[in-house]
């Protein structure tokens, strides 16, 4: 028997970005009787997370407003919120919002935060939504559920626990000499605390990565008035995301079930053929790829491990560049900076980084696709290569303890954690938990596409409803008893 004291809840949610907040919102909406929910977050920005916690007006959603509702069953909810908050929109330079407009991410963060506050104020008597600012250190099984350990050896108990960690910081490049990672000339991620002060002071900056986060940092540097002379962007291919273009929906073209492609070669052959067919009819490639979105989990699950690894090695960067696109205004600004010579792209693989000039600068060595060795000397290197997905490489205390306890373990592709179709986490013994669940990025190994709002809102709704059903089983309707003779 667990004799430790501490508050008791029906549902504890670790992480209050979009995913965790929407689990709480949907759970409270689904409750048929009093429900005690606790939402635990590392910061007081409940509902925002890193993605929507930015205050930079140039950081835009990469999906139009019409497709950003937090609710599966109410696709216009976000757009109505924008119409009701015109003064706030004008403060971010939006004015009268349009459904096809790419809205500043800060506004979406405010939208989710207000949804959370509104749901908390509408709960029935006896229902509780408790918000706690803390860094969860550990979770362990206990009688009747799980115990969640917070800072300062405080703890609470819950019958069900949801892990909603969002994305983790990027992993450092695999270099033999790792001294650079401890120097003041390297930032492992750009968005924490006073880190922009270090970026602002640097005249020559190297950004590792050329995807969405790199574009975000470039725009933030211009917004902050940084006096940077040159911003170098380095990735293996050197290319950035493609721009959005408005287009009508394209019909699904891959059959369901057994006729689906079973190899990555066959899948890409079919996609390219369909893009060419659409092109002959004057249809852009973008809606063709977008038509795969609903089928992506089934397509991914239909591939064996060999073909999944082949995709990650050879096609992942191509897919990410075309699938996760940027608003046209963002691309125009990046291209303007390239034309002016402020932004300079490089294609190659990092081979070494070391400090020079008494530790005030960095010499970076990289090798191009043509196997040529080149060097850059900069004041600061910022890692924007994308979130680390190998949980065994994370230095997060909670993840370290969960792995040590065997409550979770990585999927074979090291993209996330082993998870059941309903989000139940699998332990090291191969058993799915009946008390510990997750959604979002930890499910990438199973679903691959699992970090955008359209996927997350559906996961949050389904998971919340299942958890409430387990916590509050429906009472069978009373009927007239019948007897057979």
Image (spheres, rainbow, N blue to C red):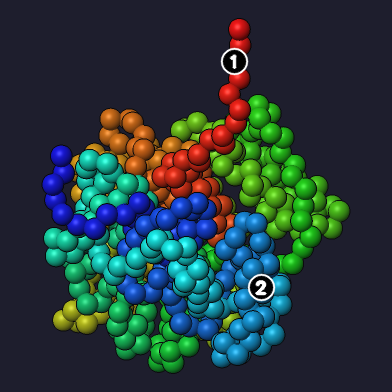
> Which of 406 and 281 lies nearest the eye of the viewer?
406
Is 171 on the left-hand or right-hand side of 329? left
What residue is shown with label 2?
A: 79
Foreground tag (2 vs 1) = 1
Marks 2 and 1 sit apart, C-alpha to C-alpha, by 56 Å
> Which of 220 and 55 lies nearest the eye of the viewer?
55
Residue placed at 56% from the left, 91% from the top? 91
Task: State the SS at label 2.
Answer: helix
On residue 103, which mark appears? none
Task: State the SS at label 1.
Answer: loop
Is 102 on the left-hand or right-hand side of 153? right
N-terminal label among 2 and 1 = 2
What residue is shown with label 1?
A: 483
Residue 296 visible to the viewer? yes
In the depicted structure, whether residue 46 falls above or below residue 219: above
Question: How many residues crowd mark 1 within 10 Å: few (<14), some (14–19), many (20+)?
Answer: few
> Which of 377 and 322 lies nearest the eye of the viewer?
322
Where in the figure is residue 15, as x and y percent of width and height?
36, 61
């Amino acid at each position: 028997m667990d004799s430790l004291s501490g508050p008791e809840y029906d549902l504890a949610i670790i992480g209050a970005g979009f995913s965790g907040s929407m689990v709480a919102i949907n759970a409270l909406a689904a409750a048929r009787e009093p429900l005690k929910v606790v939402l635990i977050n590392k910061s007081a920005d409940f509902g925002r997370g890193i993605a929507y916690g930015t205050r930079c007006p140039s950081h835009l959603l990469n999906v139009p407003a019409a497709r950003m509702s937090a609710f599966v069953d109410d696709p216009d909810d976000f757009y109505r919120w924008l119409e009701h908050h015109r003064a706030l929109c004008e403060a971010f330079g939006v004015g009268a919002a349009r459904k096809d407009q790419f809205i500043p991410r800060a506004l979406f963060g405010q939208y989710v935060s207000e949804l959370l506050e509104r749901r908390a104020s509408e709960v029935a008597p006896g229902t509780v939504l408790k918000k706690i600012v803390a860094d969860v250190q550990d979770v362990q099984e206990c009688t009747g559920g799980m115990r969640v350990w917070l800072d300062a050896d405080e703890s609470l108990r819950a019958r069900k626990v949801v892990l909603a960690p969002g994305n983790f910081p990027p992993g450092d490049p695999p270099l033999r000499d790792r001294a650079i990672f401890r120097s003041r000339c390297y930032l492992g991620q750009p968005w924490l605390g006073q880190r922009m002060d270090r970026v602002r002071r640097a005249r020559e900056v190297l950004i590792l990565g050329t995807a969405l986060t790199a574009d975000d940092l470039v725009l933030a540097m211009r917004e902050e008035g940084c006096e940077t002379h040159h911003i170098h962007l380095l990735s293996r291919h050197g290319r950035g995301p493609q721009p959005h273009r408005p287009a009508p929906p394209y019909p699904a073209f891959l059959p369901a079930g057994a006729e689906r492609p079973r190899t990555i070669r066959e899948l890409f052959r079919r996609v390219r053929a369909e893009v060419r067919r659409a092109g002959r009819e004057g249809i852009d490639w973008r809606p063709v790829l977008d038509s795969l979105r609903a089928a992506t989990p089934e397509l991914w699950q239909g591939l064996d491990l060999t073909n999944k690894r082949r995709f990650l090695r050879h096609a992942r960067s191509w897919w990410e560049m075309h699938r996760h696109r940027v608003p046209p205004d963002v691309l125009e600004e990046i291209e303007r900076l390239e034309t002016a010579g402020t932004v300079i792209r490089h294609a190659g693989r990092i081979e070494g980084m070391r400090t020079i000039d008494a530790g005030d600068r960095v010499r970076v060595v990289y090798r191009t696709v043509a196997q040529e060795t080149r060097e850059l000397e900069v004041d600061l290197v910022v890692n924007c290569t994308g979130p680390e997905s190998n949980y065994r490489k994370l230095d997060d205390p909670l993840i370290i303890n969960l792995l040590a306890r065997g409550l979770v373990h990585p999927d074979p592709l090291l993209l996330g954690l082993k998870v059941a179709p309903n989000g139940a986490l699998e332990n090291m013994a191969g058993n799915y938990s009946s008390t510990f669940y997750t959604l979002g990025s930890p499910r990438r190994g199973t679903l691959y596409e699992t970090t955008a709002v359209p996927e997350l809102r559906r996961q949050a709704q389904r998971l919340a409803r299942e958890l409430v059903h387990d916590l509050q089983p429906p009472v069978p309707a009373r009927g007239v008893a019948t007897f057979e003779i």
